[in-house]
Amino acid sequence: MALGKIEKVIGQAVPIPGDDIDTDRIIPARFLKCVTFDALGEQLFYDVRFDEDGKSLNFPIDQPQYKGANIIVSGNNFGCGSSREHAPQSIKKAGFDAVIAGSYAEIFFGNCTTLGIVCAEASDEVRASLMKAIAENPSEKMEIDVASSKVLFNGNSYDVSIKPNSKSAFLAGNYDSLADLLARMSKVKELEAGLKYSFKS
């Protein structure tokens, strides 16, 4: 089934400051034994959200003013560390549709794109300005325009960058390679019919 185009991401943003936020901080390794990804949203950033007794540490995504946020604004080298798919899955399952960071680990970025998570890159200056504005106006809606690579927030426009391949995939609605393959099943059948050997079902 073909996926919908992603032309804009609109919603509430939450600042998560810090560079080198790795995949183990995003989703601790002990939660990787799951059969499905369904519960991973609840375990997002678990070890920096709760202490050993399960008491809240008032991490940004748990603060009431950011409840329902679907855009993360963070630092450089976001998603570094081991290349576990569970990290972007936990972000998606927690309801986030986009991340604005200084840079991303390559495999993490690719996994996010496949899940339809827009990963925009922004300068230190832009992110500092956004984080300050978000803290002052936490309920204000943010808009990420994928085509123009602009972020609109609180009456201001900010320049960001979205990698060309990712941008074109979002705008065309073919960012998930499996969904794209299934949508082209007639072509697959056509190719299969032309092979000199066959697959037995």
Image (tube, helix red, strand yellow):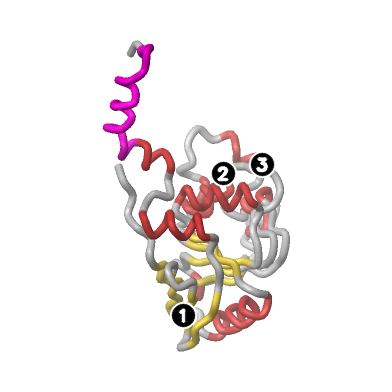
Q: Amino acid at mark 3?
A: Ala
State the SS at label 2: helix
Tell me where the magenta segment starts and ends, as one range.
182-199
Residue 161 occupies quadrant: bottom right
Residue at screen point 59% across, 67% down: 121
Inter-mark Cα distance, 2 to 1 = 30 Å
What residue is pinned by disc 3?
29
State the SS at label 1: strand
In this orientation, does residue 82 appear? yes
Q: How many residues crowd mark 2 within 10 Å: few (<14), some (14–19), many (20+)?
A: many
Q: Amino acid at mark 1?
A: Leu
What residue is pinned by disc 1?
152
What residue is pinned by disc 2?
86
Inter-mark Cα distance, 1 to 3 = 36 Å
Main SS of the magenta part reads helix
- Tell which circle, 1 or 3, labels the residue nearer the N-terminal end: 3
Q: Nearer the viewer, residue 30 or 58?
A: 30
Q: Nearer the viewer, mark 1 or mark 3?
A: 1
Residue furthest left as drawn: 186
Q: Nearer the viewer, residue 92 or 102?
A: 102
How many marks are shown on the rendered structure? 3
